[in-house]
């Protein structure tokens, strides 16, 4: 009887060791397996088995990761100092490479994103940085995706969040915008005057071709004057009637 107890202990211990190798992975998780130090094909999701004492497992999350890129001091091509921050979306496509090819793919991707953000934003002028965000986002994404591809990481999207301008630059841009609005207002007013002058000239040519049109205009003016509650009646006198007198006075 006493000889069976050690055997029972050994059996129970062996059963616990075997059961400890069972692992459950979620749908978005993969297990990177190292067997005696050498990497083997990743496993999961669902129930997997890791040989105790021989294999070691590292979990890798395959979901899209949202990473905030801290504000970076950038000097643009036209020597304007700004602060730019962005947000980065990426995910792991190859768990084995994400573990083997780089020590910490999260930290490495973050540092690469910060340096790339400074580099790309510094290559353009301030107006391009403000007006062509889509172009800059696409450029940063292209560079990051090419650099992280050997790590098994796919950069999905890069978006500039905020561009912080110095107060002096904000005031200068406000004055520029105000001057631009004034210029547009003056151009629109001048264009309206020009179109009105064109219409008056067209009307004058029509009246010159049809003299009776001026008489109709006189009658319309009388009707407009008569609608008011006043005792004054204005009779427009054609300038042509005064032309002979004006010519005699000049002689």
Image (cartoon, rainbow, N blue to C red):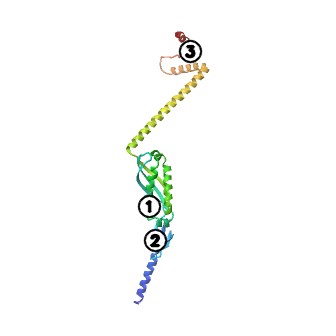
Residue 155 seen in render: no
Percent from the top left, x then y, of residue 168? 38, 43
Q: CA distance from mark 2 to mark 3?
A: 107 Å
Specify which label sits upstream in the sequence, 3 or 1: 1
Percent from the top left, x then y, of residue 82? 41, 48
Residue corresponding to mark 3 = 240
Residue corresponding to mark 2 = 57
Query: Cβ–Cβ below 8 Å for labels 3 and 1?
Result: no
Above or below: residue 237 compared with residue 6: above
Between residues 62 and 125, which one lies in front from this camera angle?
125
Q: In front: mark 3 or mark 1?
A: 1
Q: Residue at x 50, y 52 (%)?
A: 139
Above or below: residue 148 compared with residue 220: below
Q: CA distance from mark 3 to mark 1?
A: 91 Å
SS assignment at label 1: helix
Outermost residue to the left: 167
Q: Quadrant of residue 167?
A: top left
Residue corresponding to mark 1 = 108
């Amino acid at each position: 009887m006493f000889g069976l107890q050690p055997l029972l202990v050994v059996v129970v211990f062996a059963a616990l060791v075997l059961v400890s190798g069972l692992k459950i992975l979620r749908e978005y998780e993969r297990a990177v397996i190292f067997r005696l130090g050498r990497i083997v094909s990743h496993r999961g999701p669902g129930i997997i088995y890791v040989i105790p004492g021989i294999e070691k497992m590292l979990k890798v999350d395959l979901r899209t990761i949202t990473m905030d890129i801290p504000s970076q001091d950038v000097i643009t091509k036209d020597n304007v100092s700004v602060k730019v921050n962005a947000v980065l979306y990426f995910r792991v496509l190859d768990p084995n490479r994400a573990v083997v090819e780089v020590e910490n793919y999260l930290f490495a991707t973050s540092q690469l994103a910060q340096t790339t953000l400074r580099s790309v934003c510094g290559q353009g002028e301030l107006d391009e940085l403000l007006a062509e965000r889509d172009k800059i986002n696409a450029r940063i994404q292209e560079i990051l995706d090419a650099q992280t591809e050997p790590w098994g990481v796919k950069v999905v999207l890069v978006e500039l969040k905020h561009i912080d301008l110095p107060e002096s630059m904000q005031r200068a841009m406000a004055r520029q915008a105000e001057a631009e609005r004034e210029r547009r207002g003056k151009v629109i007013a001048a264009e309206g005057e020009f179109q009105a002058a064109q219409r008056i000239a067209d009307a004058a040519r029509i009246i010159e071709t049809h003299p009776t049109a001026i008489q109709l205009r006189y009658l319309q003016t009388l009707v407009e004057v008569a609608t008011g509650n006043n005792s004054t009646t204005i009779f427009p006198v054609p300038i042509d009637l005064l032309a002979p007198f004006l010519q005699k006075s000049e002689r």
